[in-house]
């Protein structure tokens, strides 16, 4: 489904590439032993290296390197056995070194790809240009005091991975799917927690537009530091439309960094690239190049968990799920684990349907993640067992489920407590049917004359008499036999 902007002069398409900064999951920072824990008191996690005291030397955290390699493998990317840390010179008070240690000429990870599943059932590969490692900066706070700015260096030196994507994205939806898929891969790998609200994943978005069918790219604008999937999607839409309007009114797009204002639904210039800093990159003389061996990479590859794409294929093959259901379930590692617990030894399609419709509706409604579900996977499994062995009907199971949501109790306990056990006692059901047939001669006649619809009326009467607890299979079988006489 192409995303097209209808202009006065024709149809336009959007061209978009994302640069994602992802904070590496590690106890310590990239070049020091300070803690990376989120939410600590300002400036309590700052070593002399992070504060850039003269004479302090950075020491590479080997675990961070391993996490970057794991991520590269998860992105089906080329791992560069030789990479180099460079100094990117610019001065902000929140980066006291006066430069950021990053990787420009020799990044640790080269080209790869992320596959996104589109709503129409097709999939598309979004190319990865590179993944490089760098330090995060501290945080300047300008809103705490009318005259002074404050600085918190806790984040300074925390390890980031910058994942530079190719300009393969053609719609806000594709950008959203790409970010979600990237986050899902990080979470499966355990290399970044993907919590955008805590800033552990931020996106810079490059947006340009061109006429449908046009080759080559036009000038792009960069939208900086977007911290939610929704904002990224909105920002692309707003910026693409701004550029189309500009071209159509005879203007041109300038290459610049812009800020997305979600409250006003507009983008505004931050700084022009032509005035941008000259970063004067050069290899950091305090750090040796990173040289990895193929054995080291292979060892990490062997330790990789099953990733979403592979898991999706397995769910389709092993459990017979539709690609859509499988895709929904593997999008979250925890949801896929929840599903497997419910599905093992049971009807997998029924398990998938309960999770993706009934359970997800409740979680959405309550704003909960699946690992906060009031109904555990074990209990949902037990509920399906009660349906399978005829203790409750599918309809009653819904009622039991909502009681489970409210109480967190075991379904069998709820069924006993509330007397919801399905009536499969043929004697009791037979008695009700006999009474109905005796008292409704007209309807019996209609049925015998070939009006099948009357059967539904009888079923309704039986369900009413048993408060919905009659076993539908038993009812059907007895009813038809008796009606035929
Ligand atoms: Mn960066």
Image (cartoon, rainbow, N blue to C red):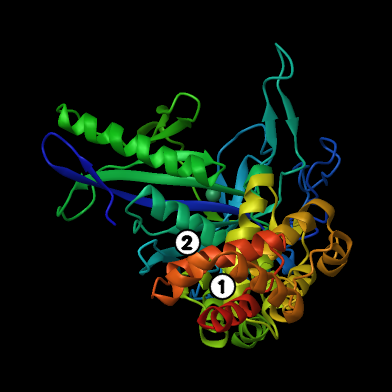
Instruction: Identify the residue at image location x=27%, y=54%.
Output: 2
Q: In front: mark 1 or mark 2?
A: 1
Instruction: Identify the residue at image location x=58%, y=68%.
Output: 353
Instruction: Report the quarter where the C terminus lies.
Output: bottom right
Q: List x then y, in percent, for residue 34.
A: 83, 52
Q: List x then y, in percent, for residue 323.
A: 46, 74
Residue 42's disc number? none
Res. 135 in view: no
Q: Residue furthest top?
A: 146
**Label 2: element kind:** loop
Q: CA distance from mark 1 to mark 2?
A: 31 Å
Other-residue count near label 1 (Cα within 10 Å), few / some / many at <14 / 14–19 / ≥20: many
Instruction: Report the quarter where the N terminus lies.
Output: bottom left
Q: Quadrant of residue 426?
A: bottom right
Res. 278 in view: yes
Q: Which residue is mark 1?
A: 308
236 to the left or right of 360: left
Q: List x then y, in percent, for residue 361.
A: 61, 53
Q: Nearer the viewer, residue 156 or 309?
A: 309
11 to the left or right of 365: left
Instruction: Identify the residue at image location x=56%, y=66%.
Output: 458
**Label 1: element kind:** helix
Q: List x then y, in percent, for residue 475.
A: 63, 75
Q: Quadrant of residue 474?
A: bottom right
Q: Is residue 271 above or below residue 161?
A: above
Q: Which residue is mark 2?
A: 105
The disc, 1 or 2, on the residue closer to the chain's N-terminal end is 2
Other-residue count near label 2 (Cα within 10 Å), few / some / many at <14 / 14–19 / ≥20: some
């Amino acid at each position: 489904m192409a995303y097209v902007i209808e202009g006065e002069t024709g149809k336009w398409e959007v061209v978009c590439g994302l640069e994602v900064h992802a904070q590496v999951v590690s106890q310590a920072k990239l070049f020091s032993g300070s803690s990376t824990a989120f939410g600590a008191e300002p400036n309590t996690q700052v070593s002399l290296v992070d504060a850039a005291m003269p004479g302090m030397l950075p020491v590479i955290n080997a675990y961070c390197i391993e996490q970057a390699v794991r991520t590269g493998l998860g992105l089906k990317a080329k791992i560069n056995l030789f990479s180099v840390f460079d100094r990117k010179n610019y001065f902000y008070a929140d980066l006291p070194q006066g430069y950021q240690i990053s990787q420009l000429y020799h990044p640790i990870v080269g080209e790869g790809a992320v596959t996104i599943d589109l709503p129409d059932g097709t999939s598309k590969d979004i190319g990865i240009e590179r993944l490089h490692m760098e330090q995060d900066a501290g945080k300047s706070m300008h809103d705490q005091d009318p005259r002074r700015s404050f600085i918190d260096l806790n984040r300074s030196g925390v390890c980031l991975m910058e994942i530079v994507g190719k300009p393969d994205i053609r719609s806000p939806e594709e950008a959203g799917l790409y970010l979600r898929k990237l986050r899902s891969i990080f979470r499966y790998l355990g290399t970044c927690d993907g919590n955008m609200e805590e800033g552990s994943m931020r996106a810079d978005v490059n947006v340009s537009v061109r006429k449908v069918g046009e080759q080559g790219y036009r000038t792009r604008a960069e939208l900086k530091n977007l911290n939610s999937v929704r904002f990224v999607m909105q920002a692309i839409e707003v910026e693409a439309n701004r550029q189309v309007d500009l071209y159509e009114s005879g203007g041109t797009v300038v290459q610049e960094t812009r800020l997305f204002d979600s409250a006003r639904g507009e983008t505004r210039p931050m700084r022009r690239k032509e005035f941008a800093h000259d970063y004067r990159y050069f290899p950091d003389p305090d750090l040796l190049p990173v040289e990895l061996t193929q054995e080291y990479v292979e060892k990490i590859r062997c330790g990789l968990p099953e990733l979403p794409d592979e898991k999706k294929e397995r769910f389709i093959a092993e459990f017979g799920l539709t690609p859509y259901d499988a895709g929904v379930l593997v999008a979250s590692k925890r949801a896929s684990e929840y599903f497997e617990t419910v599905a093992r030894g049971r009807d997998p399609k029924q398990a998938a349907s309960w999770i993706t419709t009934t359970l997800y509706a409740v979680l959405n409604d309550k704003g909960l993640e699946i690992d906060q579900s009031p109904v555990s996977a074990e209990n949902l499994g037990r509920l399906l067992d009660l349906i399978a062995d005829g203790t409750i009907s599918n309809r009653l199971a819904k009622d039991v489920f909502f009681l489970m949501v409210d109480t967190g109790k075991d379904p069998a306990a709820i069924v006993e407590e509330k007397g919801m056990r399905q009536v499969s006692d043929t004697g009791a059901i037979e008695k009700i049917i006999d009474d109905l047939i005796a008292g409704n001669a007209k309807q019996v006649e209609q049925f015998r004359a070939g009006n099948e619809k009357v059967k539904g009326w009888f079923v309704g009467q039986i369900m009413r008499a048993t408060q919905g607890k009659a076993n539908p299979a038993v009812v059907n079988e007895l009813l038809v036999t008796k009606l035929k006489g």
